[in-house]
Amino acid sequence: MTVPRAAPDPGGEFVAHPPHQEPAPGQPDPPPGSRGGAWGRAAIALSVLLGLVVLAQAMQIAKLDSRADRLSRGAETAKRSYERRLAHLEDRTDALTERVKRSLDPAAVAKHALPSVFRVSAGRSGGTAFAVGRSPDGGTYLLTNYHVVDELKGSDTVRLSRERERLWGTVVDSAPSRDVALIETDEKIPLLRFAATPPRPGEPVVAVGAPSGLEDTVTTGVVSKIRAVAGRDEEYIQFDAAINPGNSGGPVLNAGSRVVGIATAKATGAEGIGFALPIGVACDAFDVIC
């Protein structure tokens, strides 16, 4: 065994070096750089592990993205399907609404119309009139056929009646060529409104009048056709609701309780063939009611 010797310090002092230790018998010396290699392998293993984690996360994110895309496409498809179904339901609703509008409830139409419809007595002639507008002094204008009042002699006064009501009216205007006349009364009577468009063939209608003096008579039918009539300048609405003498001048109403025409005539020797003057003709004749 070698005893270490003191080496002189540059400053003149002696410094003792640590003794050299011999490896134990049978124990090899550690190879140089073994600690650095272990740390390197650990770093590589950690890098591989982190790489695997990142790869797994990337794969999971890709799967989630793919699923999100499928859900988005499914939601878009469901939305388009819903919109198509909604549009279909809206179309069906519109069609059903139109059918309801055109379906006839005679009781409802009669209840609405009857308070506005009166029997007209004009000398020896008689017919029907209905309220259509307000006069400047707060009274009421009523429409009827001219042939109902054309036999008045020396007077323009007519009598209006309905149930227990007895009124007096005055013929204030007429259009003989169109077979319409305008009556004014001082009383305030509920008004009937006019249809905005002509009726169509097959459309249901209600005729209200006083045939043979029988007030508040209601009959129903359908429009057959709008046609020209021999000897008349205007086209007429042909319908099959029963009318008789005394209905002349009365309203023909659609399912919405709007007046489409004025009952004017029926075919002689036949049943179910009546004619109504379109309400637009009266509007053209008398501006005060339209």
Image: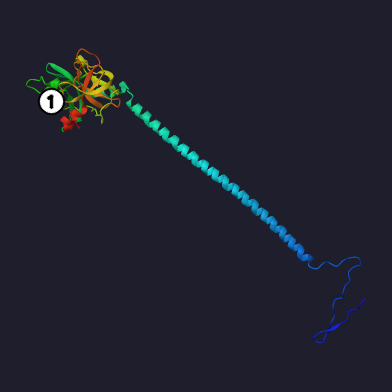
Residue occupying the point 69% across, 55% down: 49
| Dot 1 alpha-carbon crowd within 10 angstroms: few under 14, some 14 to 19, many 20 or more | few
Q: Quadrant of the N terminus?
A: bottom right
Apparent side of residue 186 relative to residue 25 in the rendered image (left or right): left
* Rendering coords of residue 47 (x, y %): 69, 58
Percent position (x, y) of residue 271? 24, 14
Query: Which of the 4 image quadrants contains residue 259?
Result: top left
Q: Regarding mark 1 in the picture, which secondary structure is present there?
A: helix
Coordinates of residue 109 in the picture (x, y in percent): 29, 23
Q: How is the image coloured?
A: rainbow
Look at 63% across and 51% down and name the residue there: 57
Along the line of sight, the residue nearer the viewer: 122 or 145: 145
Q: Which residue is at the front of the view, 70 or 247?
A: 70
Find disc 1 in the rendering and name its residue. 177
Quarter in which the C terminus is drawn: top left
Q: Amino acid at mark 1?
A: Ser
**How many numbered circles are shown?**
1
Image quadrant in which you'd find residue 107: top left
Residue 15 or residue 37, whichever sits in front: 37
Residue 177 in view here: yes
**Residue 135 visible in rendering:** no
Q: State the residue lying farthest toward the right.
A: 1
Query: x, y percentage for residue 175?
Result: 13, 27
- Can you name the residue that lies furthest to the top here? 269
Q: Residue furthest left?
A: 154
The image quarter containing residue 264 is top left
Please determine whether, in this image, residue 202 is positioned above or below residue 6. Answer: above
Kindly give the residue lying farthest to the bottom in the view shown.
12
